[in-house]
Image (tube, grey):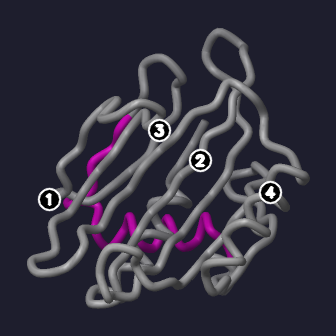
Amino acid sequence: VLGIKNSQEQLAQEFKDAYQDRIINYTDELYGFQISYPIGYAAEEDPEFGTNFRATAFVPGFSSEVLDVYISNATFSDADFKEIVDAVGSQNSIEFSGKKSINGKEVYLLNTRNESEFTDEILFTRNAFYNCQAPDGSAYSAAIVFVVPEVVASDIELADYVIASFKC
């Protein structure tokens, strides 16, 4: 789990070694970011306004697992992170929040556990906020959000891998 393993790079490498034949790598043409996710997820580019990439795994009878990548043409700051933590913390149980180094980048991480507003199920959410540079040299920030229903809580480690696989 992010924040518990020795390093996010180690987690990503262990997961990749174990499941290499079941991983898909996505590269965004405009921003140049890369992210890996498992085979079996339905992937979409620009599925709705503000979401640049989405991969979804259907969980019969429950909420789906959802990976979203959001891009902003502004960089992310400590003040932005504090504002998000304060807002999220008022409605969710925060399991971890803070900064970690992943692949040589300082990344803001926020892990939560909350009850879905639409169903009676518990959802675990992994959030990561990266500051990046596009191929044209412009700065942007990327927010990665991975939601895992409690019924497949073992996939939280998968969510941690996906976040650790992000490169920009």
- Residue at the extreme left of the image, as rendered: 60
Instruction: Give the residues drawn in magenta, as a range.
Output: 7-26
- Measure the alpha-carbon separation of dots 1 and 2: 22 Å
Judge the density around disc 1: few (<14), some (14-19), many (≥20) Cα neighbours within 10 Å. Answer: few
SS of the residue at dot 4?
helix
Which labelled disc corresponds to residue 40? 1
Identify the secondary structure beneath mark 2: strand
Q: Which residue is mark 3?
A: 34
| Residue displayed at 62% across by 78% down | 91
Residue type indicated by callout 2: Ala
The residue to which callout 2 is attached is 143
The quarter holding residue 71 reads top right
Question: Residue 135 is drawn in which quadrant?
Answer: top right
Q: What is the quadrant of residue 168 in the picture?
A: top right
Observer-nearest of 21 and 95: 95
Residue pictured at 63% horizontal, 31% vertical: 72
The answer to which of marks 1 and 3 sits earlier in the sequence is: 3
Q: Position of residue 11 (x, y in %)?
A: 53, 73
Crowding near the residue tagged with mark 4, few <14, some 14–19, many ≥20 C-alpha atoms within 10 Å: some
* Mark 2 burial class by Cα count in 10 Å: few <14, some 14-19, many 20+: many
Circle nearer the viewer, 3 or 4: 4
